[in-house]
Structures are given as C-alpha cells and as structure tokens.
Amino acid sequence: MINITFPDGNVKQYKKGTTSMEVAESISKGLARVILVAGVNGETKDLQLPINNDAELVFYKWEDDEAKDAFWHSSAHLMAQALEELYPGVKLGIGPSIDKGFYYDIEMPGDKIFSENELPKVEKKMKTLAKEKNSYNRRPVTKEDALKYYEEKNDKYKVELINDLEDGTITFYNHGNFTDLCRGPHLPHTGYIKAVKLMKVAGAYWRGDETREQLTRIYGISFPKQKMLDEYLVFLEEAKKRDHRKIGKELELFAFSEKVGAGLPLWLPRGAALRERLEQFLKKVQAEYNYEPVITPHIGQKELWETSGHYAKYGKDSFQPIMAPDGESEFLLKPMNCPHHCEIYKLKPRSYKDLPVRYAEFGTVYRYEQSGELHGLTRVRSFTQDDAHIFCTPNQLKEEFFKVIDIVLYIFKTLDFKDFTTQISLRDKDDKEKYIGTDENWEKAEKAIVEVAQEKGLKTITEYGEAAFYGPKLDFMIKDALGRSWQLGTIQVDYNLPERFELEYTGSDNEKHRPVMIHRAPFGSMERFVAVLTEHTAGKFPLWLCPEQVAVLPISDIFNKFAKKVSNILKNNDIRSFVDERNEKIGKKIRDNELKKIPYMLIVGEREQEEGTVSVRRQGEGDQGSVKIEAFAQMIKDSINKELSENK
RNA sequence: GCCGGUGUAGCUCAGUUGGCCAGAGCAGCUGAUUUGUAAUCAGCAUGUCGGCGGUUCGAAUCCGUUCACCGGCUCCA
C-alpha cells in the first residue's frame, strides 16, 4: 500500500501502482471527468501513470496552467498526426504548447508550400481524428531504437533532437497511428479536444538559428468546449479594436508616410499633445529627484562611437555614416545618448562630493531595425528615449538604483499599469562575445542588479542573453492588447562605458576613481510608451485620470453601444465640452451627438488649469468652469450606471 | 533579412472566369429648410485600383520586379 497526500492535507491509502485517474475516480466521477493531468510530488504527470510510492497528489483542471500545457501539447500531437495523414512524408520539428495555444514546426515534403488556406482542411482532419478518442500512450525507448525509428522515417530534425538527449531519458508518445518523441505529459485521450482553430502560418528557423533551415510553423489553439473557442475568438476581435495602430489612426495621434520612410513616425497634433503632456509629467518628477536636463546633438563623430564600442558592434547594420563636405569626416546618427552624456561628464574634473551627477534628456535616437521588425509605434527606426545617465560612486549605486525604481513604479502607478513583469536581463552564459568589458565588471554589475531587485522586494524573472551589450538590465515589461510583451522601463548598470571613456572622479583619499553609470528610461521610449498606454486605456471604462493632468478618456467601440447613452448623459448633465482647445473638434463632435462615429475620446488637460481638474462648459453659459477630475469621473460613472440600470 | 499574406477615393470596403467612361457608405464641399446647435433634404466633386516593367486587341483583375503594411521567425545598443 502507498500513502497519497492531497492538497488539503488528507492522506489516503491506495494499492501500489494505482493511477492518478483511479484515485480521482475513487473520490468522485465528477472530479474524474474534469481533470486533465496530475501533479505527483510537484511534477506534472499523465493521469494513467501508475504511482508506486507515497506521493503528494494534485489534480489539474482546465483552469490550471499545467492542464492547459498538456491540453495544447496534446493538440500539437494531434495536428502532427493530421499533417502526416494529409501530407505523407512531412518532416516534423518541434511542437510545444505556448502561452495561448500550440504550434508545430514542419517541413513540407518536396517543394510544397503550406499556405493559410489549407488550415481549414487540417482543422477538419484534426476534429475527425480527435473523435477516435485514441489514448496517448507513454513508452520509454532506448536512444538506439529512437534513432532507428526516425532514421527509417527519414526525419532529420527528430534525429538531431534525439542525438542531444541522454540515453535512458527518452520517451515516445503514441496515439492512434502516430508516434512522437516527447517528454509529456499528455491528456488521457484525443477525445478531450473538442474545439480546434488553426490560427496562422509563419516561417521559423530550425532551433531559432537564422543560419539554419526555415521551417513552416503552424499556430493553433484548442479547447475542451466549442463555446470556449467562440469566446476566445471574440476576445481576439475585441483586442484588435484596441490596437494602438488602429486607435492612433482614428484619433490622429501619429502616422507614417511611405515617402518619409518606414519606421519613421510622424506625430500628429493630438499625439504630440499627449506626448508632451507625458514628458512634462516626467520632467517634473525628475526635477524632484535632482536630475539636470541636458541637450545633445543627433549626430556624433565616428570616433565617438568607436570609443563607445557601438561602431564595432553595430556599425555595419546601422544607418551609414554621414560625410562632411571635406569627404573625410564621418558622423553617425546617434543610436543612443550615453556617449554624449559621458563627454559632458568628462568636461571637468569631478570630485566625489559632486556625485551623483544625473543628466537627463529626451533624446531622439536612430536605429536601423530590420524591415520585418517594424511594428506600429512599438518598434520604429527613430524614437525618443526618456533617457538619463547617473554617474555615481560604487557606494552610491544601490541608493541611486532604488530611487530609479521608485520613479518607474510611481509612473506605472500613476498611469494605472498594474499588470507588468519585472525582468532581470543578464548576459548570455555561453556567448560572451556579444558583450564588451571584463568578466569582473559584468559580475559586479549583475550582482548589483540582482541584489537591488531582491532588497526592493520585486518579483522578478531572470532572462539570460537579454542584457545590453555594455551591461545587465532591470526591465519592466507590459503586454499589449494581444498579449505580446513589450519592454518599457529599463534600468541598466554599467561599469564598462566609464572605462572606455576614462571617466574619473577624485575620492576622499585624493586618488582617482572610476564612477559607475546607471542608464535609465522609465517610459523606455515615448513611441512605445504611448502605444502601450493607448492599448491599455482603450476600452477601459469608466475612465481613468491622473492628477498630473495626463488625462485620457478612451471609449473604444467595444463600448459603442454605450456611446449614445454617454452622449445623452453628457447632455443631461449639461456638459457641453470637456476638452482643451486643441481638441475642440472632438468637443464639437460630442456636442453634436456624433459620438457614435468617434468611438474614442481623448482628453488632454488644459494648460493653464489648476492641477487635478478638467474644464467643463455648461450649456447656455459662455464661461468655463473647472471641476475636480475625480468629481467629474464620478459624475459620468454615476450617470452611466443609472442610465444602464434604467434601460435594463 | 527570412517565411506566409495584404495593398481599390480622407476612412471602411464592393468590384463576377481580364472587356462598356471603376462603385457604395461615412467624412468633405455647395445650397435649401429650420425645430437652437444637432438634424433633414437636394446637389457636387473625389481616385495614375501602391510604384515600375511585361503578356494581351484590351488588365484593378494574369506574370515579373519593387515599395509599404499585416502575422510570425531572427534581431532589438
């Protein structure tokens, strides 16, 4: 007999070799129906796997991430089976579950191209196969047998994978006539997969290496109920409506012109107003933290970038040098502001008493991103960083770092960014060639970041290979409407550039010392920040407003059905206009009961206005009054709630 | 850069197997009406069908090429 411990602490005895599924059945049929995989001593396992020793047992249902993983992974196998039947000779790469669904990388037989219009065919096949309720069977194999199987099948990708595995740890899973190299775990059988949608086809390099073959990656998602799939598709549709590229166009925040060039955003009056407001907000915060604004040119001599290390690292892939008329002097568009700031630091001898020195600049930089990388405002070729560089003594590093974290968190809080992740971005362990500086400096810098994050009590994830080329980073990541993660705020510790630029200060011991440099940008870039801000506020209802007069009231057409009501409410409350002069046109629209045609409203607080207020014009009176933002927000909220409940 | 897709008036789109002067709604402009704006009605205009080259008697529709955008991959100082 073995003891099974349940999450609530209960212990029950079962026969040795009992499966998790049997345990579940012994508790209740209902439970057995909804569970998908089991956690045995903390490891996720198949429900059919016998338990041979005392164990702690957890059941995972669809709601649990462990279950979704298995569900989607099993779906990937199902898709692979369908593909093998439809396209005999197809070679399989890898097919994991992902955040939302699954994919499989395949190589089509011959020169065949798999295009999107074949997806329905594969979907249909998957559904047919799923109905066979074939069970997923786990089977350990020796490395020799595994290799033999795939060599006979002529599947070079699997052979490569197996070669990297250790003998004795290899398992196959099969269901129906399909076998795959796989660690598991899986669902009990294919019948669990009731709804399938194949989303898109994309190219993906084998093992993420751009020098290797490009496989076809097929993305899909599946659910245990058709209704869940329908809901998911609706969610995707609605997320699309919050896309900053769509809203940016509709609201005339920004635009691109083919003639100006790809990835070079044009800020339109309304977008510029919003951006300016954000800049003023941050400038005010930075002034309180004793930052000193500086302004530097957009170009610098090639030599500057050779010193910084940029030229050697990125020179080839950057905008190419600008030549002076003498045909000799070369200048580069700046890809970052640090070297200019270093030169400012160097202008005069510094004493430890002068430190820390904090130079801030909204600096526009130019990076030649690959054409396929450009993406709305989130990835562009010219963008403005809310940059600052702090030069301090090693002893001051932590305190300065803490203060920067405070600024970032303050901004996020003010703008209502709750759902962000904090990432420690360290050097790639294996490929150190990508970075400049000594191991010693890197270790110091990485240690500093890890400690600071810990002491600050931040929940962090650690990613290797995500560091900047001169130092490790603490990054603040936010998701966009479709769940794609973007780095916004970033704080970086740098021992390397001070060395390259030979920065110094005189210490209390009258000796020369090297300062440490913190690079930081709480927004990241104005472009990306406005993009993510737009997506975050769109569709949020009721409005949010912040006391710094950065006020945005978006009503996406998700709420279009309320638009008319809102318009009526504004009327009933005698609110005629609540936008500043630059947005007079939107104000007019609202007055004109045309709200349904303008699904978003953007409010940018008025320049000469008392903090924390918005201006309100009342019907029949020419004068303009101000009300507290909170009061105004409440007024709108109350009215809408009242309106909605009356109309029920 | 790579794989797949898209590109028609300011916006959202329709354009049958290549064939009459390329269409609709919204926005715009002019005028009328007046219930205060809103609205309503009448009328007007609008596009080198992304660019270039080709096939054809004839192309928005077929082919090539190029640019831009979209979804991914790689990249991201």
Image (cartoon, coloured by chain):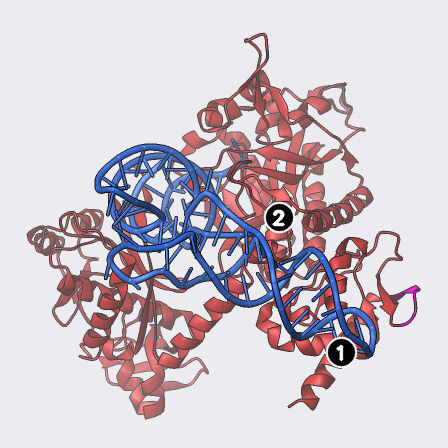
Left or right of A435 in this view: B45 = right
Mark 1 vs 2, N-terminal side: 2
Q: Which amino acid does label 1 sit on?
A: Ile
Chain B hue? blue
Q: Residue A379 carries which label?
A: none
Q: Which amino acid does label 2 sit on?
A: Phe
Which quarter of the image is occupied by the N terminus of chain A? bottom left
**Residue A1 position (above or below residue A175):** below
Is any atom of residue A237 visible in this view? yes
Residue at x 83%, y 55% (from the top left corner): A606
Q: Does the magenta stretch include residue A623?
A: yes
Residue name at image x 77 percent, y 49 percent: A281
* Same chain, labels 1 and 2: yes
Left or right of residue A622, residue A435 in this image: left
Q: In which quarter of the image is residue B66?
A: top left
Relative to A242, does residue A643 appear above or below in the rendering?
Answer: below
Q: Give the range drawn in magenta.
A: A620-626
Direction from residue A625 to residue B14 in the image, left or right: left
Residue named by callout 1? A569
Percent position of residue A468, x then y? 52, 37
The reply to whether dot 1 and dot 2 touch (C-beta < 8 Å) is no
The residue closer to the viewer here, B59 or A281, is: B59
- Which chain letter goes with mark 1? A
Q: Quadrant of residue A2?
A: bottom left
* Subunit that carries the residue with mark 2: A
Kindly report the distance in space between the C-alpha atoms of the residues bearing marks 1 and 2: 30 Å
**Circle 2 residue:** A254
Of residues A383 and B4, the one drawn nearer to the viewer in this rendering: B4
Residue A113 in the image: above or below residue A398:
below
Q: Residue at x 44, y 25 (%)?
A: A316
Tell me if residue A477 can be seen. Answer: no
